[in-house]
Image: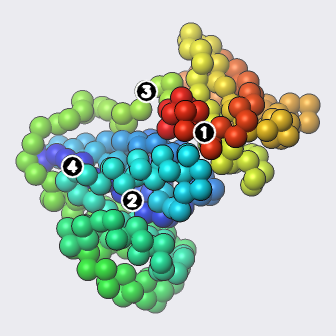
Amino acid sequence: MRSGFVTLVGRPNVGKSTLVNAMCGHKVSIVSDKPQTTRTRVMGIHTTADAQLVFVDTPGLHKPVTALGQRVNATALDSVNDVDVVCLVIDATKPFGKGDQWVASHLDLPNAILILNKIDAVKDNEVMRQLTMASELGAAEYFPVSAKSGKGIPELLAFLSAKLPEGPMYFPEETVSDQPEELWVAELVREQLLAVTRDELPYSIATRVTEWEWPRIRVEIIVERDSQKGMVIGKGGSVLKEVGKLARAQLPEGAFLELFVKVDKDWQRKPDRVERLGY
């Protein structure tokens, strides 16, 4: 049996969460086209007959301007320590640039794996050009993949499994994530909020479960201003109703989901508020 931990790091929106979901065969991280969707470290587990890979999905590394940004950056950078394999994920649809190089500068690249994601969205010659530019980093191995189509995923999984040391299973065979149910539901609601609300809202939204008496679940949605509260609720409660419907569709049958909106002024700029919300 081989087992170990594999961390994925990269800029925001390079598709780390979608990639973890694809490799685990289950949805363990929420996904969105909005940058910095992932705010905490999430583990997804892929178990086979002879290996267990524990994937660590991390927040996108970026230049922080708030207490929340500083906290999620620290979470991502701390996740490269004490793991068996580190993977730098870059986006095939974006030019390889200073942001990727900045992330790479925080890694032990001669022992890291570089993953070029989203190759389904570009032509083969662009994939080769991106890999050629990224080769300057001197990573140990390079893998072009598509988390969306699954191309290259089996080869990547086989390579990572072989890289792991011999060891025990860290989680029961049926486990697919380390997330508590309460956190998963809160994140599920935030995912649907990101899909439904306007572009200016994502960074200002946080969610948390405040009551859990199955089948009744109460989720609090925190925003920074009264005007944002109105946007989240929507005319006649339309936005909140749509978010609730979309979230319930991914919960076990019979779940009763209650959504409430609360204003906590400038919460993401206040370290104590950020910590209280679990970031």
Quadrant in the rendering for residue 89: bottom left
Which comes before the other along the chain, label 4 or label 1? 4
Give the residue at x 25% y 52%. Answer: 81
Which of the pair 99/4 is nearer the observer?
99
Disc number lying in front (2 or 3): 2
Residue at mark 2 to residue at mark 3: CA–CA distance: 23 Å
Task: Give the quadrant of residue 255.
Answer: top right
- State the residue position of label 1: 270
Find residue 82 and name its label.
4
Say what amino acid the circle numbered 3 marks.
Pro
Disc on the earlier residue, 3 or 1: 3
Give how far apart the Cα atoms at labels 4 and 1 are.
30 Å
Q: Earlier in the sequence, mark 2 or mark 1?
A: 2
- Give the residue type that dot 4 points to: Asp
Q: Please identify the residue farthest to the right as the structure is shown.
A: 236
Query: In the rendering, at what x and y percent does residue 8 appear?
Result: 36, 57
> In the image, residue 224 lies at what x, y percent?
73, 39
User: Could you tell whether 245 is left or right of 172 in the image?
Assistant: right
Compared to residue 37, the image places residue 172 above or below, namely above
Binning the other alpha carbons within 10 Å of mark 4 as few (below 14), some (14 to 19) or many (20 upward) gives few
